[in-house]
Each structure stands twice: as structure tokens, then as C-alpha cells.
Amino acid sequence: MRMNSNRQIVQLLQDRKVRKFRARFLELHPMDQVELLTTFSKEQRDQVYHYLSPKEFAEIFQGLESWQQIEIFSELHVSYAVEVINNMYLDDIADFLGELPKETQELYLKKMNQQNAAEVKCLLKYPEQTAGSVMTTEFINIKETDTVATVFEQLRREVVDAETIYYLYVVNQLDDLVGVVSLRDLIVADLEQRIVEIMSGRVVAVDVNTDQKEVTTLIKRYDFIALPVTSQGKLVGVVTVDDAIDVDEEETTEDFHKMATVSKLGKSLKEAGIFFLYRKRISWLVLLVFFNIFSGAGIAFFEDTISAHIALVFFLPLLIDSGGNAGSQSATLMIRALATGEIRIRDWAQLFVREITVATLLGASMGLAVSLIGLYRGGIEIAFVVALSMLTVVIIGSLIGMSLPFIFSRFKWDPATASAPLITSLVDMMGVVIYFSIATWLLSI
Amino acid sequence: MRMNSNRQIVQLLQDRKVRKFRARFLELHPMDQVELLTTFSKEQRDQVYHYLSPKEFAEIFQGLESWQQIEIFSELHVSYAVEVINNMYLDDIADFLGELPKETQELYLKKMNQQNAAEVKCLLKYPEQTAGSVMTTEFINIKETDTVATVFEQLRREVVDAETIYYLYVVNQLDDLVGVVSLRDLIVADLEQRIVEIMSGRVVAVDVNTDQKEVTTLIKRYDFIALPVTSQGKLVGVVTVDDAIDVDEEETTEDFHKMATVSKLGKSLKEAGIFFLYRKRISWLVLLVFFNIFSGAGIAFFEDTISAHIALVFFLPLLIDSGGNAGSQSATLMIRALATGEIRIRDWAQLFVREITVATLLGASMGLAVSLIGLYRGGIEIAFVVALSMLTVVIIGSLIGMSLPFIFSRFKWDPATASAPLITSLVDMMGVVIYFSIATWLLSI
């Protein structure tokens, strides 16, 4: 149904039926307007800029990804662009202008509404990845001495400009954050009550310099709709749940990519260019090549054993992969549990002991499975060598896999760096040495 | 500071200072109460059950993970337990009772508040993973013919029981969902206005049977705080953003685990037992062993070539790992982009073409790197064999890695099943055949 309706809207655009196009297009949810806009040709987009007011277009513009914003922005007339900016939320303006070259940024800061420009400049100063860089400054702040009735009046006046109103943060005369009142509390309160009587003093807040990851963790942990941000105890902004969700999605994507040794993309996969992707992928791949040379060196060391028992090579991929696979499982379980805060560094010892038992069971089962193949391929001796190697490799692989994320965490690196490819390469080295050592030892008797 | 305050609270418990303990403990945010409770001994918990009313304890109970709830619940006196249930939100009751054995479930359904029990029974009927199973039925529903003033009065009466009040969903006389009004709209409206005049008719809703994944995607996409749930057009519930975040975290964790071939845990990693973890990990590990046997078979087929040029084994782990690593990168990029809805199945062809170019560049760079080592280890011929194999393996590995998630998606399997270990094992097979084929062909001339 939506596909169909979209086709009709495009037709109206083609037929240049301005009024009908506007009626149908503006009826859509802003996010659906965004999606439709991204399917338009340059020509169609130019029409849209004419048909919609800067205010209407600002709502769409705010929903675009930053690389799309930059592209679209370059197509706008300067005066139209300035009006679009004047109709955006301040935190969105700061996010967008932050992506532009310094000169363009300053040009628009000069041309836009000057009161807003001052606040945007403030926001631009907060380092990326901090609470300050994701917060909004358009919130309503109320005084502890206000009455409920006054606050309702204030709400009616200020609600249009505010990004969030469901929690109202209370300040004292010095502008220190002292409490919080939900709109819910306000509705059930008597109109003559003072805010200080109905507010809750147990308000969780973060400093402007707090890492954005910690901000989203708090919002998720406490089921907040918004979280106040302070600077030296003074209320300076609010992070809303929808912005926190966006941050969280970004961070999770980054974790996924790290686990496959892809560097931070920071843009849409779909639109990423060939050389861009090459750069993001090559460094780890080459680094891992050099790790693997050690596996090769291990093999070179055991060349005599291999020449004497060429059947051993048959089991090489099997053994080293199995160790890597078991290790990747352990690493991923730990990485995710560390990311969600379910486990902490101090839990390592306890988990290590459990991992030994689990890995022994896994290794024994897999050793049993491959010993049958070993029996068939090379007789009882080979079967024994392969089974024992499997058990050892799986145990060592699992222990490396589970410990590495903790070690990285300990050194303040992202535990997600303990990627499956890294674990595989590390365990391969160990695997080669263990396998051929066991073989040399047992088969030379 | 919090650590310190927690220690004081534990001390008050030890000294049996009921009043002081209550004052300090209840001052904490419910989520902090939860965290503190989980550090208590059985004895200390028994004290807490005595010191807190069922209503106070219900707030903590709702914040526990379900496996913790089951453990704690077994420690409560039946009459206390019933009162705890009576003070919980209906959707939380349903979630919890759904985890209990049928008999216990029915026992508590009989003993609890009967009006609530009827609604909980309804909720229990919705299959897991659907909108129905995560929604709340405690919402406020307003009529399009109401005035703003009436709605404010209604709010004051019903707000205590409702889980969400920031968006009010509007129904007509047949109880069909026809619109939505935010509390924000309500505040700026005149008291005499009718709801139908200020409501928005463009309301996004989902059916009770919608997959929970889709529900969270919508909430994230549109930055909703709540999403109404309908059954045959009638409003039956609301999914709130905090529940959607919990669902999303669960699903993301599942994706992470799948990518490392760990089956769905469904419980805390920290508390998972040894045999439980063994079961969740062993099946894929053994399955992959059998994949790897094919790599072994490939090696067996080329035994003559290997015997003649034993130096080739040196490069085996290097080549097959590199193909697997490049493939894991591609797969992970696709899996994540498919999960966030950034790309769709129909984008495959376009991305495939780009992947060929990127992979050729990656393979060429890595081929160049290893050819130097080849030159050193085995002379010009080996260097050429290894470089050509690297190029081919990386291209084929990348293309398998990027295509598999699409193929899985196409067959309605979870794309995350295209895990790094699976890709590695598949690419190993190809790698062995490619490497030794090229070697046999070039070295026998």
C-alpha cells in the first residue's frame, strides 16, 4: 500500500501538481518523507526544494544521515539553506555543521539566527563521543520554588521549542540541578503545590565530558526517557532516549565490524566507495598475514616429521580451525557480556575456571569425533595423535579466546578487538606447534 | 561513593536497624536496589522480605532478570508472593508467570487479584517474540469526541496505573484506533477543544502478531516513545521504548552469538552452567569438523604435489586463513547492514560488483606481501604460486562471505548464521583446492 501511495506522489511531482503533491507528501511521517526523498533524482529534488518551505524541508533534513545531508545541502540556494538551518534543532545543527569544512561552517554560523549561532558554537566545542556532543540544549528548566500552575503556564509557552518535556529538571537559584519532576507527577499534583514538594531528589545526571557509551548504558539501565547533563553541577543539557538509541546502534555496529577486523566505517556501507572500503579492510588483513607466517615457521620447523608422515597434513586445517572456532565462541561470549555490563574484569578468574571445564568437555567430544576419521585415514597411532591434539588445541584456543577480551579491557582497549580472525590466527600458531610436537613425540617412539 | 553508601546499607541490615535501613535503601533508584539485592546472602534477602512491603519489593522484583526472579520467588512466603504479583505491571506478571511450570503458574493465577488474572491470561496466550508478548495493556485510551479538559481529568485518575502516558491513543466508538495525541499537544491545546481536532490521524501501529524485531525497528526508525498494538484494527496494547530497547539488546546479543556459532543462550552468561554452555557450543563445533574433513580430502588428493614440494605446506595456514579473514569481513559488513535495514536483498547484485573490485585490490596487495616471503622461502616459482593463490583465495573468500548472508536471508534464515567460523571452514576447502591446483599446474611444467 505504501509503495503504491509513493508512486502516486512521484506522479504528482512529475505532473507538477504542487498543491496535491504537498498535501499527499506532507501527510507522510517525516521519516517516510526522508525515505522517499532519497529515491528522487536530482531534478525531482530541485522541485521539492521549490515546493516545500524551508521549515517543512528542515524536518526532512534532520532525518537524513550526515553524508546525505552534505550532498543535499550542496544543492540548496544559500538563502534557502540558511532558513533550513534556522528551523532545525540546535543539536542537529551542531552535528551537521561539525561535518562541514571550517570555512563553510563559519559562513553559515554568520548567516544564521545569531542567538542560535551562539549556542551552536558552544555545542561544537564539546569533543566527539561525549555527552556534550549528543545532548540537546533545548530543554525546559524549572525552579524548585515554582508552583505547579506556573510550570504548566511555562510549558504552554516553551513546549514548541523544547525537544523533550516528559521529564522536567529542577534547578535552584544557583542553577544547580537539584531534582526531577515527570510530567506524570505534574498532572496528578495540585496546582498550588510547589515543585520542591513533588520533585524527586534522586536524580541521575552525567557530566558533559562523560563518554557517550556510558550515557546510553545509563539510559538503558534505568529505562530513562531523558538524562540530564551537567557541567560543574549546573544543568547544561539533556540527552533524549532517541538520540541514545542512535548512539547505541552506531557503537554496536562498530563492535560488529571490529569483531571482523573492519576499521570504523562512519558512513553507510551502501554508499561507501571502493578505495574507502579497501582502506578500512586492508590493514588488519596484512597484519594477520604476518601472524600467519609464524604458523608457517612452525611448519618449517617440523618439516622432517611432515615428510615422514604426509598423512598428518590431512588433519592440519581441521585441527587449527577447530581451535580457532572454539576460541572465537569464547571470545564473542565475553566481548558481548563485557559490552552490556553483564560481566566485569574482576569476574575473569571465576569464568576462567569454568572455561577450563567447558573446553575440556568440548575438546574431548571433538577429539573423539576426529579419532574415528584418524583411525580410517592413518591407523591407531595417527588417531591417537589427532585426538590428543584436538583436545589440547580446543582447550588452549578457548582459554586464549576468553582471556583476550579481558586483557584488552584491562589495558583500556576495546575488548571487541579480540576478533575471530585474530583469535584464529593466534590459535593457528599454537595449533601447528602442538599438533606436530605431539606427532613428533608419539610417532618417533 | 555509591560503593561506600552500599556498605553502610549492608551494615544497617546486619545491625537489624529496620527503620534506618528502609530509609536509606528506599532512597536508591529501583535499579540500584536490584543490583544491591543480588549481592545479598540468602539470610540477608530473608531480612529484606521482612523489612519491605510486598509493594516496595514488587518494584525491585520487576527489575530482576527472569532466572533471578525464579530463584528469589521460591524464597518468598506464598501470601507475600501473591501480594508482590498484585503490585506488578500486568505485562511483567505475564512475562514472569510464563517462565514458571504450568502448575505453579495456575496456582498464582488463582490466588492473585482476579481482574488482573483475566488480563494476564490473555497476555500469556500471545506467542513469544510477538508484539503481543512484549506489549503492556495498562495504557490510557481516549475517545475522539472527548474534550481536552475531560482527558486531563481522566489522566489524573488513571495515571497511576498506566505504564505510559506520553502518547495517548485515540479510539472511535467501535474501539478502532483512529489517531494519536501527545501529552505535548494536549498541553498547548485549549481545554474546550475536542480531541478529534488536535489529534494526528497518521498513527503508525502494529498487529499483535508482528515479530518483536519489527516492532523495535519501527520504534527506532521513527524515534517513538511508544507504539500502539492492534488486533483487527482495535487497540489492545502499547509497546514502550524501554521494553523495545530490552528486546533489541536481546536480539543483538543473539546476533553476536550466532556470528560465533553459539546457540541462543537465553540466560545470563555469568550464571550459565557448564553443561548448559557445552550444549550451546558443541553442535556447531562438531558440524564444522565435518566441513573441515573436506579440506583434508582436498589435501589427500594433492598428496603427490605436497610430497614433491614440502615447502608448500609452509604457506597453507597463511593462505586459507587470509581467505577466511577477508570473507569474514565481508560477511559481517553485510549481516550488520541487513540487520539495521540499511541494505536489502535486492541490493545484492550492486554490492557484488563492488565486492569484486574491492576484493581484487585486497587480494593483489596481500599477494604482493606474501610473494616476498615466497621468494625468500622457496624461490621465484613458489613466490608466483603463492601470490596467485592468495589473489584467487581472497576474491573467492570475499564473494562467498558477502553472498552467504543474502542467500540465508532469501531463504528466511537469519543472515547472522553466516558466521566467521562457517565462512572460514567453507573458504578453507576452496583454498586448499585452489592453492594445490595452481601449484600442481605451475610447478609440474
Image: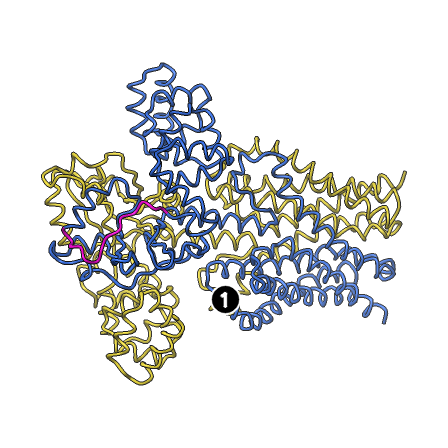
Chain colours: A yellow, B blue
Tell me what residue is drawn at x 38 percent, y 79 percent.
Answer: A41
Residue B59 appears in view? no
- Residue B381 percent location from the top left of the image: 79, 67
Q: Is residue B144 magenta?
A: yes
Of residues A254 and A18, the one nearer the viewer is A18
Label 1 marks which chain's residue? Answer: B
- Residue B177 percent location from the top left of the image: 30, 58
- Residue pointed to by mark 1: B344
Q: Choose top left, top right, bottom left or bottom right for residue B409.
A: bottom right
Q: Quadrant of the C terminus of chain A?
A: top right
Q: Can you say whether A421 is above or below A195 in the image?
A: below
Tell me what residue is drawn at x 20 percent, y 42 percent.
Answer: B157
Q: Can you say whether B349 is above or below A197 in the image?
A: below
| Number of marks present in the image shown | 1
Q: Can you say whether B255 is above or below B385 in the image?
A: above
Q: Quadrant of the N terminus of chain A?
A: bottom left
Q: Is residue B348 magenta?
A: no
Q: Can you say whether B9 is above or below A310 in the image?
A: above
Kind of residue indicated by mark 1: Arg
Label 1: few (<14), some or many (≥20) within 10 Å? some
Of residues B168 and B381, the one nearer the viewer is B168
Label 1 residue SS:
loop
Q: Choose top left, top right, bottom left or bottom right for residue B300.
A: bottom right
Residue range of the region highlighted in magenta in the rendering:
B136-149
- Residue A246 percent location from the top left of the image: 38, 54
